[in-house]
Amino acid sequence: MPVPTLIAHRGYSAKYPENTLASIEAALSAGAEIVEFDVQMMADDEFILMHDSNLLRSSGVSKSVFSLTSTTVRNFEADHYSTFSTQFSGIRIPLLDHVISLFRQFPDASAMVEIKQDSLEEFGVEHVMKKLLSDLKNIKERCYIISFSYDAIEYTKQHSEFKTGYVLHKYDTPHFEQAHKLKPDLLICNYRKLPALDETGTLEEAALWPGDWKWALYEIDDAELALNYGRNGAAFIETNQIGPMLQHKDFIQEVKE
């Protein structure tokens, strides 16, 4: 029975502030084989882990990430106060270099690095991607570059040997055609954008698009739902609840079969 591999979405993001060293280390320590995180470029061409282009949600300050540098970013926390209150006061926004160093302590784990469209639009695809691929070169054998940007994935495929993942805005014919042109290693989609599962746990309209890629679905925190999508062709499942998902007895039983 097909069982998907779990990916920690922004680290162990249900329990720790997303895209922080604490969240990523917790996911790795829990046994995650792959940890996904987001990166944005700053004014000095260095990268930080951040989903948004503004610090408001993570740090409680309305400030563009594009105005920051490796020095000034140290002044801001990433405690996600609106979610965690004061539980993680003092936690900082990590530089990409910090996370690469952390992955060296977990040599069997892979990184899934999402370059955000905001940075690509602010600084240009070629400028951003050239620097990002260079920064990640020491872990390229266990690193996926993923993005909603067709151009970013196309650049990666043309200029590197990194594995790639194309994140779909929509599950529709234009994106299907783009995927066939791009030929990424992974197609990645929020499961809610897919046709619904019927009462038997089967996709109602059709199977996941066939191609020379594997499917990764995200925002799934329920083990049975993850397993259902595995039966329907998803090779990977991204979850915010990496700890409970890895420990879920039914999921473990199916993995052992």
Image: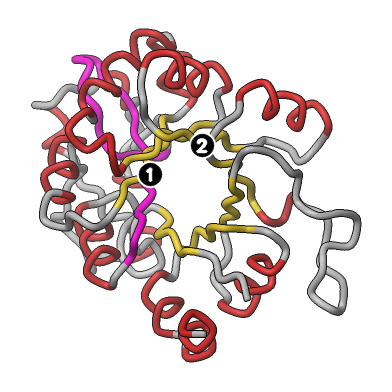
Q: Quadrant of residue 41?
A: top left
* Location of residue 13 in the rendering, given as x and y in whole percent from the top left corner: 38, 61
Q: Is residue 76 left or right of residue 118?
A: left
Is residue 146 located in the magenta-colored stretch of the structure?
Answer: no
Q: Answer few, some or many: residues within 10 Å of disc 2's Cα (few below 14, many 20 plus, some between 14 and 19).
A: many
Residue tagged 2: 165
User: Residue at 30% across / 44% down in the picture?
Assistant: 142
Q: Answer few, some or many: residues within 10 Å of disc 1's Cα (few below 14, many 20 plus, some between 14 and 19).
A: many
Q: Nearer the viewer, residue 191 or 207?
A: 207
User: Residue at 46% across / 35% down in the picture?
Assistant: 146
* Location of residue 129 in the rendering, given as x and y in whole percent from the top left corner: 36, 17
Q: Kindly indicate whether the residue at mark 1 contacts the one at mark 2 (C-beta within 8 angstroms).
A: yes
Q: Earlier in the sequence, mark 2 or mark 1?
A: 1
Amino acid type, residue under disc 1 in the picture: Met
Q: Is residue 198 left or right of residue 85?
A: right
User: Residue at 23% across / 16% down in the picture?
Assistant: 45
User: Residue at 21% across / 61% down in the picture?
Assistant: 25
* Location of residue 202 in the rendering, given as x and y in whole percent from the top left corner: 82, 69
Residue tagged 1: 112
Q: Nearer the viewer, residue 77 or 150?
A: 150
